[in-house]
Image (cartoon, rainbow, N blue to C red):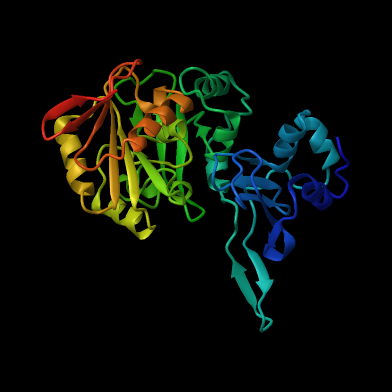
């Protein structure tokens, strides 16, 4: 492995010349994982790495260890003296042209209260923590460690949310809502528990999971839940239910979203589907629909399976009210228009 004594030289030699911001602390590179142009942000002061295109996000030590294929402990030793965890910090101040102090908006997400309240499933210290880790990484959710870190997923060891996976909705560097999902099977009637009004800044009718990342893409995939969005990809948003409220629709329009693919769970009713269709029709340039009638929702499918369904849907170039239906794992593709079903696949 190359010498890390001069970290800036190491990064430039490895990933090319960066664009530099925030007084030299924020370096932006092409992402080596998704090949996104100028999307990988490395903050040398806070020692965090985050890509705005793919779900990758981690500490600087983990990022280099993954790239060099060496143990993280080896990188931490080489980087000793640097801050390796970077989610607790004070607001950054710098002098403006007149010599006055100007408040600079932090580029990393400040989750100090979130990390104090809930526990990290990637570093389990209790039997419950090990179960949370197994739930997220195993067959139940099939997430990667990078996704768990990037989406800031925690679990609750105690309190009202004990035994639940905690998934935050982050907007403008604040946790404005969260999803609490039972992973121990202790409350089968309430798999999801909503936060109290005084715990978050917004209601479920005002937020979209993964909004800031997904809205940067040309086509946005709308799915129901947060875990659905994580399984579909970085361009997916979870509407956290089956309704796109006027507030959510306006949020999408204000962000400049023009093309949508809607991918609902298999249990959506005809009424819910109709109301959602009516709420989106005429509001966006292109809306395409993927309806799954098999035994798995998007969150239970692999990333590759979900992308294949979406690829087929977008390739057909359907116009509203066209709908693509996939039946079972073999997937019989049909176009539904005006009550007529034409088998085309």
Percent x, y for residue 337?
16, 34
Percent x, y for residue 284?
28, 52
Percent x, y for residue 267?
24, 25
Of residues 66 and 189, which is closer to you in this image? Answer: 66
11 with respect to 120 (left or right)? right
* Residue at the left extreme, as displayed: 339
* Residue at the bottom extreme, as displayed: 98
Quadrant where the N terminus is found in the figure: top right
Quadrant where the C terminus is found in the figure: top left
Percent x, y for residue 58?
64, 40
Query: Does the image show residue 194?
Result: no
Q: Residue drawn 70% across and 55% down?
A: 27
Q: Residue drawn 61% across and 43% down?
A: 35
Q: Residue drawn 40% across and 37% down?
A: 179
Above or below, 44 relative to 231: below
172 with respect to 270 (left or right)? right
Which corner quadrant of the image does residue 102 belong to? bottom right
94 with respect to 280 (left or right)? right
238 with respect to 342 (left or right)? right
Above or below, 60 relative to 103: above
Count of labels in the image:
0
Query: Does the image show residue 109?
Result: yes
Q: Residue drawn 64% across and 59% down?
A: 90
């Amino acid at each position: 492995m190359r010498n890390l004594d001069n970290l800036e030289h190491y990064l430039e030699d490895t990933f090319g010349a960066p664009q530099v911001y925030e007084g030299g602390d924020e370096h932006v590179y092409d992402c080596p994982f998704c090949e996104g142009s100028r999307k990988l942000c490395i903050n040398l002061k806070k020692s965090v790495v985050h890509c705005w295109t793919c779900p990758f996000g981690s500490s600087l030590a983990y990022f280099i260890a993954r790239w060099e294929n060496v143990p993280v402990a080896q990188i931490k030793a080489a980087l000793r003296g640097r801050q390796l965890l970077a989610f607790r910090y004070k607001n950054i101040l710098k002098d403006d042209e007149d010599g006055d102090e100007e408040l600079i908006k932090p580029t990393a997400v400040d989750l100090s209260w979130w990390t104090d309240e809930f526990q990290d499933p990637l570093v389990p210290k209790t039997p419950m923590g090990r179960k949370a880790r197994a739930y997220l990484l195993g067959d139940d959710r099939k997430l990667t460690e990078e996704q768990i870190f990037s989406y800031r997923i925690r679990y609750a060891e105690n309190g009202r949310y004990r035994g639940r996976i905690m998934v935050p909705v982050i907007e403008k560097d604040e946790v404005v809502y969260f999803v609490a999902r039972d992973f121990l099977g202790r409350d089968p009637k309430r798999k999801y528990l909503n936060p109290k009004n005084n715990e978050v800044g917004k209601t479920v009718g005002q937020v979209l999971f993964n909004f800031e990342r997904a809205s940067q893409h040309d086509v946005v995939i709308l799915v129901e839940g947060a875990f659905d969005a994580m399984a579909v990809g970085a361009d997916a948003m979870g509407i956290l239910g089956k309704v796109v409220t006027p507030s959510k629709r306006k949020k999408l329009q204000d962000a400049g979203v023009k093309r949508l693919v809607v991918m609902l769970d298999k249990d959506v009713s005809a009424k819910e589907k109709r109301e959602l269709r009516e709420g989106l029709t005429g509001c966006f340039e292109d809306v395409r629909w993927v309806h799954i009638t098999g035994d798995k929702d998007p969150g239970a499918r692999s990333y590759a399976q979900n992308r294949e369904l979406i690829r087929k849907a977008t390739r057909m170039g359907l116009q509203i009210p066209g709908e693509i239906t996939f039946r079972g794992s073999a997937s019989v593709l049909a176009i539904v228009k005006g009550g007529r079903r034409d088998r085309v696949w």
